[in-house]
Image (spheres, grey):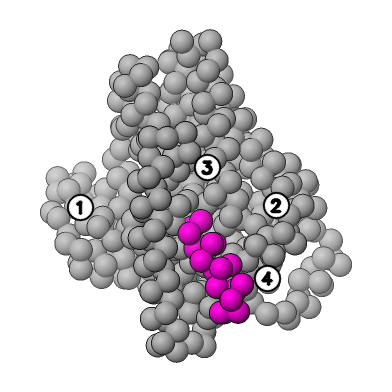
Amino acid sequence: MNIGVFGTLVATSLVLLLGEKLIQWIAVLRTYSIPAPVAGGLIVAVGVLLIRVTAHVEVRFEPMLQVPLMLTFFATIGLNAQLSSLKAGGPVLIRFLALVSGLLILQNVVGVLLAFALGVDPLYGLLGGSVTMSGGHGTGAAWSQVFTEHHGLAMATEIAIGCATFGLVMGGVLGGPIARFLMRKIGDDERRRIESRDDETLVFEEPKAQQPTTPAAIITTLALISVCLTVGEMAADWLGGTAFELPTFVCVLFVGVILNNALSLVRVQLDQHAVALVGNVSLALFLAMALMRLDLWELAALAVPVITILVAQTLLMALYAVFITFRVMGRNYDAVVLSAAHCGLGLGATPTAIANMQAITSRFGHSHIAFLIVPMTGAFFMDIVNAIVIKLFLALPLFH
């Protein structure tokens, strides 16, 4: 049974409303700060799986809007990024990027070692490592083709999609519980400091907050987003096949950064409330659509060795966030939010990390530094570092 584009959009909106209601009704979801798209999307994904198993009917949602929504979200990140602000947060960004890079290496080490221990091709370890855990569906699909064409790995694409699906689910589920656990580790002075924060909310920090804007500002924002998507797609095509090849969403984000800062130089200021409104709507719709379209049947089809690797990666992410990310980033509230975001980055994708942060800051308070550095780290720097790490691992003698 195929659901058309408009039916899918209606279903996505209902998924978000369902997620909000579930969080209101179920205390444990509020306690562990589970994002609404995750709560609602997983319920629908499980429902679709049950229909397939019991009634032998396969429900397929139209994915046409999913990529445009994702690209719109990354365009709004770029249109919100001021280079002067990133410069101010430079030392923290560098420290966080170092932590992210360290996890990429560890994910591949764990994956390859477990592959050897379980007697399977070590390439499966890379597929269950940073290729899909930190790379997500896009990176997984791209590298799986390389593994099949150049290394002869069978079923690489199917396994990559299954691994990325597992990571997307766990990235959205793990962040809240990790944050709740770490909140007990910060001192009373830090708690009072959080409660006393009354400064201005930054873009994306409170998706439920009312945004004062105008139709003209929304139209201007949509026009700028369209420029980002058009030029970003052209740039991705130009770079395709070269040593500088980048995913389309990275190019879109980069165009947004250039456009925003170029306009600032000529003293043209964007309406950040409009950017926030469009960005939060596209983020919520994208995540809900991605999660409700999860084919949980593919997870059930993964072989035991791959499942073992994925469970180990989840445990690695939790331990890394608690014992390394939280401590290195300062053992304070900002470190709590960054640790939850790292769960999204390390197991899911940048949108999952943002959703994790929003769920936490909407409950406990603002964390400006987290919303400043996580989007750029996850959407730009991490993909570049991940590509380098994967190529270095593939250069090892054991893969030849």
- Using the image as rendered, state which of residue 28 and residue 244 is in the foreground: 244
Q: Position of residue 300 (x, y in %)?
A: 33, 35
Dot 3 or dot 2: first in sequence order is 2
- Using the image as rendered, state which of residue 182 and residue 284 is in the foreground: 284
Which residue matches tag 4? 366
Q: Is residue 251 above or below residue 309?
A: below
Describe the element under mark 2 as helix, strand or loop: helix
**Rounded to the nearest whole Å, what is the CA distance between mark 4 and mark 1?**
38 Å
Q: How many other residues sit within 10 Å of disc 3, few (<14), some (14-19) or many (≥20)?
A: many
Magenta-drawn segment? 253-268
Q: Position of residue 148 (x, y in %)?
A: 33, 22
Residue positioned 35% across, 60% down in the render: 230
Q: Which mark is residue 93?
A: 2
Let me know if residue 255 is in the magenta part. yes
Which residue matches tag 1? 60
**Rounded to the nearest whole Å, what is the CA distance between mark 3 and mark 2?**
15 Å
**Rounded to the nearest whole Å, what is the CA distance between mark 1 and mark 3?**
30 Å
